[in-house]
Amino acid sequence: MPVGIDTSVLIAAEKQGDFDKLLPESELGPYYIPALAATEFLVGTHPPVRADLRHRASQLYVNRLRALVSTFTEADAAQLAALIADLRAKGQTMKFFDAGIAATVLARGDKLLVLDSDFDRLSDRITLLKPQ
C-alpha cells in the first residue's frame, strides 16, 4: 500500500542527514510526498535563519525529495474540503498544511508516515506509521 510522508519526517531527515533511515523496513511502499508536505517543507527553508541550514535543506529537497512529490489532485481537494467541514462540525480545526496532507492520504486510501502527534485524532481514518 502506498505511504504518504509527512513534513515532520522531511524535517527529521534534514536534521539527521539521512532520509532513507526514516523509512520503515516493514513497509514496501511505494512512498510519496504529498504536494502540501513539500510546500510546508519548502516554506521552512526560507525564513531568515542560517544560510548553511537553508542550503542543506534545499539540497536535500533537490537531490532526494523532489522526485517523490505527488501532485495535489481534484480528489484530494474535494477530500480536503470534506475534512475541513467535518472538523468544523465537531468544533475542531487543523493546521492547513496538515489538513491537506491528511486529505491527500484519505482520498487515496494510503498510509501516512509521521513523527509527531498532529494526525493522532484521525487515527480512526488513517493508518499512521511512526518509526521508532
Image (cartoon, rainbow, N blue to C red):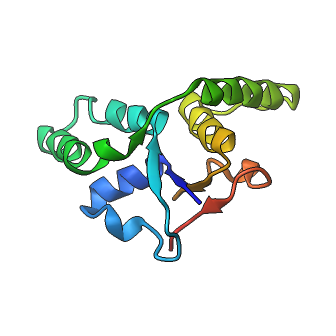
> Image check: 109 left or right of 91?
left
Residue 46 position in % (x across, y down): 26, 29
Residue 85 position in % (x across, y down): 79, 24
Q: Residue at x 78, y 32 (%)?
A: 92
Q: Is residue 88 above or below residue 30?
A: above
Residue 28 position in % (x across, y down): 49, 69
Residue 17 position in % (x across, y down): 24, 61
Q: Quadrant of residue 94?
A: top right
Q: Quadrant of residue 98?
A: top right
> In terms of depth relative to the viewer, which is nearer, 20 or 55?
20
Location of the N terminus by quadrant is bottom right
Q: Residue at x 35, y 30 (%)?
A: 43
Q: Is residue 130 above or below residue 54?
A: below
Q: Residue at x 35, y 70 (%)?
A: 21
> In terms of depth relative to the viewer, which is nearer, 55 or 82?
82
> Image check: 93 left or right of 11?
right
> Image check: 63 left or right of 2?
left
Q: Is residue 19 above or below residue 68?
A: below
Q: Residue at x 70, y 30 (%)?
A: 79
> Image check: 31 left or right of 125?
left
Give the tally of numbered discs: 0
